[in-house]
């Protein structure tokens, strides 16, 4: 009798004594995934899980946080079965869902109970049309066609997805893709949903939509585990918070305790800030904040449109960029993406462009960098009128997907490539690169292949090679997406330093980065 | 139209077209089969592709022209180019059909059709990735070209150091493709895509009378083709 009652009390989802190390078994056959595994950042070599224990009740939401490479992703992978199916290693311990062990199941068998949402929205859809993608998971489970339709109908209605059904997934923005992934998982009616940094490509609205979705799942009694750097949007979703470091759980909080932590305490833990921590910080120093151009709650908005400015004296100063006219229309769309006249980037060297996903920020910076052939217009830079297609000689751009701009075999070559046409001697080149590597903390990795670096290092390498191009304007597109607090801060410091001599335009949603930089904020609207 | 029908028609056209003796035996049928992709393209409102098809067809036709003026010119064209033109001429309708299949079929339809034809899932999944991969590679390439241009790698460098410069484009492309492929297979595994399973049958996956009709006609043409083969004809005569 006693035994029976104890069994009833057992929580809904438990992880017991979970250990994992990536060291591949010698007995294993040759693994075709090995080369790609190696490119998969630092987590391959040394990070493993040790003594992970936790339990969740039905409908609870757990927030996992900690610096990059602390084992959050690894933990999620052991739960959804990617480990040991994809990455070989030593795994022991026990994972129970609804009193049944899941460790023995293959990932595709776990799929009907455990849904996973990944970081990169681009690479998690298998179909081309939204509608197919929504029903894809269910069709794999051999659920009847009628049943799929009845499951999808309320979801589509609730999230106003009617207009999306026929669209191509390639044409959607990152946030929209992420919502498609969530709905597709929801249609499979899982009992547990895992999120791996779901917000790293989302704007404010996207994050709010994601939060609403999570709250909805919670009401449906679905248990959720979220691994995340950005904590602000999860404030009223999470029930428990776990802080991980080097594969161990180092601190556990209830949500109330966690939200009560203040700015400096969070700083000490090395994690990003909760919303409350910001509000608490700002309130006592209200005067100070006012004198600065930034205010977190209501930023100093400068609308790109409806504000005709004649070129004032300032524009004629150094490091002032002014758009005389700019027009861009894609052949497929009805309305122009960009259409404005007489707009200035003056007063300060750091400018931030914000605005919701798909509003045209990336198009704007591509046009300003002279990389968009279809854009028409004129730009004034240091008293000179410049045609748009000449601008690529003036601008250095760090793209959103940095993997696109790392060409070479080693970090050294990567930076040397930037110096190629600048008439330096071999010695000068080496010296410049060494200096740059020292400043950006890349000196130890100078002869490694760029694809072996971690996300933060890649980001710094891309910035370094762009700086070395020695162009007066530096444009950064989402430089901190997916970075943890430490990396974010080091990039912010770097940007501040460069800003002494260069004009910097940054596209970002990251409120904390904006807070660090104290820039002029330009909000983009349609 | 159902995927299976499309595949059948494509199979029929591309097989029959390349055989010379069949072309000589049924010239009218050949003209009709040549017209099928054209009409199909026009129905799909792919006017540019249709125009391209017509132009390419006419151009490749010149190798067997009887106009004296053109023949005089052709005398100076190397024989290998003429041969390539002839081969291209034979295979053009097949290419057009492949284009039609790729642009009108969704991954879902393709997987369902293949599994209903009892084709092993291992083959189906591997080939279905093609549908998803083409647009991905295209999008990646645009991004990489932008980065190349931004870095000031010019066309002059392409001529000076072609191999190294080419690697600047191809290495990031390969890296991104591998990464995306990896993440994609993880995501689809977690959604329950596996090798031995039954999948949901959609109403549009079932063959209709119209489909059967087209399939039977294509099969008949294929049969005619088989009887017309040289070796076969010999078999039936004795």
Image: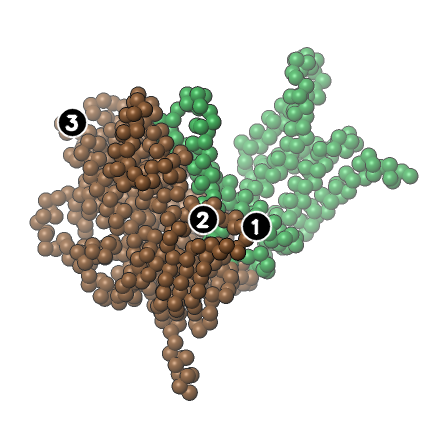
Quote the CA–CA distance across marks 1 and 3. 60 Å
Chain drawn green in the picture:
B
| Viewer-proximal residue among A68 and B78 | A68
Residue B39, can we see it?
no
Quote the CA–CA distance across marks 2 and 3. 51 Å
Instruction: Say which residue label 3 marks.
Output: A317
Instruction: Say which residue label 1 marks.
Output: B125
Provide the chain ID for the residue under circle 3.
Answer: A
Q: Nearer the viewer, mark 2 or mark 3?
A: 2
Q: In the rendering, what colour is chain A? A: brown
Marker disc for residue A37? 2
* Quadrant of the rendering where the N terminus of chain A is positioned: bottom left
Q: How many marks?
A: 3
Q: Quadrant of residue A338?
A: top left
x and y percentages locating residue A494 in the rendered image:
23, 39
Labels 2 and 3: the sequence-earlier one: 2
């Amino acid at each position: 009798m006693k035994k029976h009652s104890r069994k009833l009390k057992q929580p809904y989802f438990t992880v017991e004594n979970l250990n994992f190390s990536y060291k591949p078994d010698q007995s294993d056959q040759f693994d075709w995934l090995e080369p790609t595994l190696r490119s998969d950042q630092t987590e391959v070599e040394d990070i493993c899980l040790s003594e992970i224990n936790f339990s969740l009740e039905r409908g609870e939401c757990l927030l996992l946080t900690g610096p990059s490479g602390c084992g959050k992703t690894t933990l999620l992978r052991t739960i959804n079965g990617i480990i040991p199916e994809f990455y070989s290693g030593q795994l022991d311990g026990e994972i129970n869902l609804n009193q049944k062990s899941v460790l023995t199941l293959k990932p595709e068998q776990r799929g009907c109970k455990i849904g996973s949402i990944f970081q990169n929205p681009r690479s998690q859809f298998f179909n081309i049309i939204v509608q197919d993608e929504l029903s894809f998971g269910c069709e794999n489970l051999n659920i009847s066609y009628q049943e799929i339709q009845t499951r999808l109908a309320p979801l589509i209605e609730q999230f106003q997805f009617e207009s999306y059904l026929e669209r191509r997934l390639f044409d959607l923005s990152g946030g929209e893709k992420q919502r498609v992934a969530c709905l597709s998982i929801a249609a499979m009616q899982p009992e547990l949903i895992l999120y791996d940094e779901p917000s790293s490509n989302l704007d404010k609205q996207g994050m709010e939509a994601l939060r609403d979705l999570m709250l909805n799942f919670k009401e449906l009694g679905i248990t959720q585990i979220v691994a995340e750097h950005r904590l602000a949007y999860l404030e009223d979703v999470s029930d428990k918070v776990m802080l991980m470091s080097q594969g161990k759980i180092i601190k556990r909080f209830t949500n109330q305790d966690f939200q009560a932590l203040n700015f400096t305490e969070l700083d000490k833990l090395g994690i990003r800030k909760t919303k409350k921590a910001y509000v608490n910080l700002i309130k006592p120093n209200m005067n100070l904040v006012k004198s600065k151009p930034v205010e977190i709650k209501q930023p100093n908005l400068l609308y790109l449109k409806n504000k005709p400015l004649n070129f004032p004296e300032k524009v004629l100063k150094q490091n002032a960029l002014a758009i005389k006219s700019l027009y861009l229309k894609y052949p497929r769309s009805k309305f122009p993406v960009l259409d404005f006249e007489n707009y200035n980037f003056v007063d300060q060297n750091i400018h931030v462009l914000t605005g919701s996903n798909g509003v045209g920020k990336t198009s704007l910076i591509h046009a300003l960098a002279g990389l968009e052939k279809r854009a028409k217009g004129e730009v004034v830079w240091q008293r000179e009128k410049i045609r748009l297609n000449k601008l690529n000689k003036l601008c250095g751009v760090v793209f959103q997907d940095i993997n696109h701009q790392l060409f070479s075999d080693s970090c050294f070559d990567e930076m040397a490539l930037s110096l190629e046409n600048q008439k330096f001697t071999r010695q000068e080149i080496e010296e410049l690169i060494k200096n740059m590597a020292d400043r950006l903390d890349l000196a130890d990795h100078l002869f490694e292949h760029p694809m072996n670096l971690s996300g933060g290092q890649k980001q710094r390498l891309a910035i370094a090679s762009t700086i070395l191009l020695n162009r007066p304007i530096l444009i950064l597109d989402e430089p901190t997406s997916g970075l943890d607090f430490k990396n974010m801060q080091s990039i912010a410091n770097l940007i501040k330093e460069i800003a002494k001599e260069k004009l910097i335009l940054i596209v970002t949603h990251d409120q904390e980065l904006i807070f660090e930089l104290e820039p002029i904020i330009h909000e983009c609207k349609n | 139209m159902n995927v299976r029908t499309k595949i059948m028609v494509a199979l029929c056209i591309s097989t029959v077209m390349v055989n010379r003796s069949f072309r000589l035996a049924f010239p009218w049928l050949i003209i009709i089969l040549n017209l099928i992709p054209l009409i199909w393209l026009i129905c799909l409102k792919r006017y540019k592709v249709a125009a391209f098809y017509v132009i390419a067809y006419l151009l490749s036709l010149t190798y067997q022209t009887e106009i004296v003026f053109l023949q005089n010119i052709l005398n100076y064209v190397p024989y290998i180019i003429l041969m390539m033109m002839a081969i291209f001429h034979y295979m053009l309708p097949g290419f057009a059909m492949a284009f039609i299949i790729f642009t009108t079929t969704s991954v879902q339809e393709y997987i369902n059709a293949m599994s209903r034809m009892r084709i092993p899932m291992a083959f189906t999944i591997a080939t279905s990735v093609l549908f998803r991969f083409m647009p991905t590679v295209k999008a990646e390439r645009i991004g990489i070209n932008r980065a190349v241009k931004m870095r000031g790698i010019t066309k002059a460098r392409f001529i000076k150091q072609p191999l190294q410069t080419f690697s600047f484009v191809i290495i990031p492309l390969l890296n991104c493709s591998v990464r995306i492929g990896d993440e994609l297979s993880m995501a689809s595994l977690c959604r329950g895509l596996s090798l031995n399973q039954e999948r949901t049958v959609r109403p549009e996956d079932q063959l209709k009378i119209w489909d059967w009709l087209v399939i039977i006609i294509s099969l008949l043409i294929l049969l005619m083709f088989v009887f017309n083969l040289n070796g076969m004809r010999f078999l039936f005569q004795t």
